[in-house]
Structure formats: C-alpha cells, structure tokens
Image (cartoon, rainbow, N blue to C red):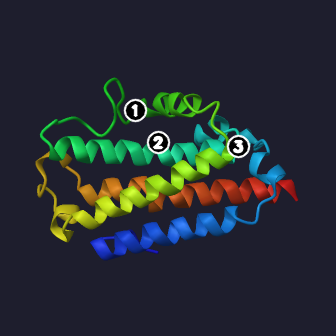
Amino acid sequence: MARPTTKEELIKAADDGFDKLMALLDPLTPEERNGRFSFDLSKEKGAHWARDRNIKDVLVHLYEWHQLLLNWAEDNQQGRTHDFLPDGYNWRNYGEMNVKLRDKHDDTTYDQALNLFIESHKKVMALAQSFTNEQLFTKGALPWTGNSTLGSAFISSTSSHYDWALKKIRKYLKGRK
C-alpha cells in the first residue's frame, strides 16, 4: 500500500497493519511467543535486529512509540510545546532511547506487552480521528509539527512501524521452522 496521504488512508493503513499483527500473533504457541530471536546479524542492517530479543520487545517498542505520539500531541495541543523525541534525543541518537524503552520493560510479560499495545493502538486511532484531514496532512496546519505533518508522525508510529514488526516477527517464525 502506498504511503497514506489522507486521514481515511492513514486510519485504514494503521488498522490493517494492526489486524495483520493480531492475526500473526493469535495462533502462536507460548514457546513461539516467548522464544528468543536469533537473527544472523551479519546479514541484517539496522540496530533493531540486535536490540529486540523477542516478540515482547517488539510489542513494547510499538507501545512506547504510541506513547511518544500520544504525549507529544496532547502536550502540544495544551500549549506545552516540545519535540516528538524526549529531551536529549534526536534522529541521530534515538537508537539509544529505543534501548532504554526496551529495558524499561524487562519485567513486562508477553501478555502484558500485548495488552499495552492493543490499548495504545485504540488510543492512537481515537486521537487520529480527532484531527481533520487538513490538520493531519497540511504542512504548517499545526505549528508544533515543524517542517513535517502530524500525519507523518501517525504513520511512523503506526502503519510503518507495524510493517517493520510484521517483517521482524515473520523472519523470527520462519527461522524456527
């Protein structure tokens, strides 16, 4: 699917990706749900291949990026202006942030991570519904989005991230067979 350019497309892409994730995860055995990733890192690009240890880590990553989006949008709407990424992080060093987000959930179980992800997806979709198409996809419609659009942040935190998660989990499951 092409990158969404309207509110309707954004919501459809996010919900479709969510549904695909749920369909992939639902039939997994406890062993598959909790199995350890073992990717050949010499063949993979991107720090995330080594960062995430299991499906739970992927789910908490998705949840935490939902939280970044939800908090950023809520704060900025209420006049508490700040960037999308927390203080101390930028698009060059956000990998360090991702490791901290993972480590924050060391004691989180798979079932807890799944529930966090499901609930945060619902909140993100409700938030997306609250904005107009113009607010989501017109540069400058919301001053706190900078040179980007709010829709771009939603896409990054939902459908694009869901595609990444599907690819990673499928690769893990394929390697177990």
**Which residue is under mark 2?**
64
Q: Residue at x 52, y 27 (%)?
A: 100
Q: In the image, what residue type sits under mark 3?
A: Asn
Asked whether 110 or 13 is in front, the reply is: 110
Q: CA distance from mark 1 to mark 3?
A: 25 Å
Q: CA distance from mark 2 to mark 1?
A: 18 Å
Asked whether 171 or 118 is in front, the reply is: 118
Element type where label 3 sits in the image? loop
Q: Is residue 44 visible?
A: no
**Which residue is under mark 3?**
54
177 vs 171, left or right, is: right
Element type where label 2 sits in the image? helix
Q: In the image, residue 77 lies at what x, y percent? A: 16, 47
Q: In the image, what residue type sits under mark 1?
A: Arg
- Quadrant location of residue 123? bottom left
**Which residue is under mark 1?**
92
53 vs 8, left or right, is: right
- Sequence-first tag of 3 and 2: 3
Element type where label 1 sits in the image? loop
Placement of 170 over or under 116, stated as above or below: below
- Quadrant location of residue 163? bottom right
Q: Residue at x 33, y 47 (%)?
A: 70
